[in-house]
Amino acid sequence: MDNLFIVGTDTGVGKTVLSLALMQYLYARNHKPCYLKPAQTGCRDPYDTDSDAQFVYRYVGELKGKDCADAVIYCFKEAKAPYFAARDEGKSIDPEFLLQEIERRGEGCSPLVIEAAGGLMVPLTENMIMVDLVAKTGAPPVIAARAGLGTINHTLLTVEALKHRGIEPLGIIMIDAEKPQTDSRMIEENREAITKASGIPVVGVIPRIVNFLQPLVYLFPIFDRLFSRKS
């Protein structure tokens, strides 16, 4: 299976929750996935409670007991764009090293699930933004989008940025983490508008998850629809 790049329409839209659910799905379908966060900000180290890798490793049974540090290439303390978070620490991201590590850590994985930091236009270096990394890896992107108000604009801009670079998204998945949850009529209107305008289907909506200890099998039909587009 091709590697996948989980990208978001913004920060905090639910990329990590989507990555977690996707990892559970891939293991259940007898694949050998690996999770990777090339650049993590807002955490002291990969074991921090705010670490995305630590969160994924905690709730994917097959990863329990394994070292979540293997899933992080760069880690910076400040919760801001990777370029600035690195600069605050007197450091920088090396694009060549980043790509080499993505390739190395993906060896033996089928697929490697790569999670972006922030949205596509977030700077990784002075001259490289997140969408550049997506393009260089060649991994088909899956777009994580909010379900509620404002998502039409943000999602269509994300699709536009990808298509402008010749990148076709595999699909769009909405995450409704709001409390109270978004009105169902608004969600359907958002799905309709995004699908019609972009030509990329919204294959499903992940509702607010209260208990991550329970396997997320009820979300698996979303991924069945997602991957049916590849066949």
Image (spheres, grey):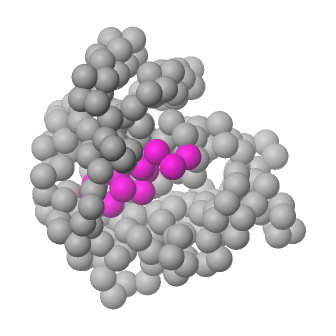
Task: Say if 163 sits above or below 28 in the image.
Answer: above
Task: Say if 20 sits above or below 183 in the image.
Answer: below
The overriding secondary structure of the stretch rendered in magenta is helix
Which residue reaches farthest top? 197
The magenta segment: 11-22
Q: Residue 119: tell me if it is visible.
A: yes
**Which residue corresponds to the image point at 53% horizontal and 70% vertical from the top-left?**
50
Q: Is residue 78 left or right of residue 104?
A: right
Task: Say if 214 sits above or below 25 in the image.
Answer: below
**Which residue corresponds to the image point at 12% horizontal and 52% vertical from the top-left?**
218
Q: Quadrant of residue 206?
A: top left
Q: Is residue 184 left or right of residue 221?
A: right
Task: Say if 194 sits above or below 62 in the image.
Answer: above
Query: Within the magenta stretch, is there residue 144?
Result: no
Residue 39 location, x and y as percent? 61, 60
Which residue reaches farthest bottom? 65
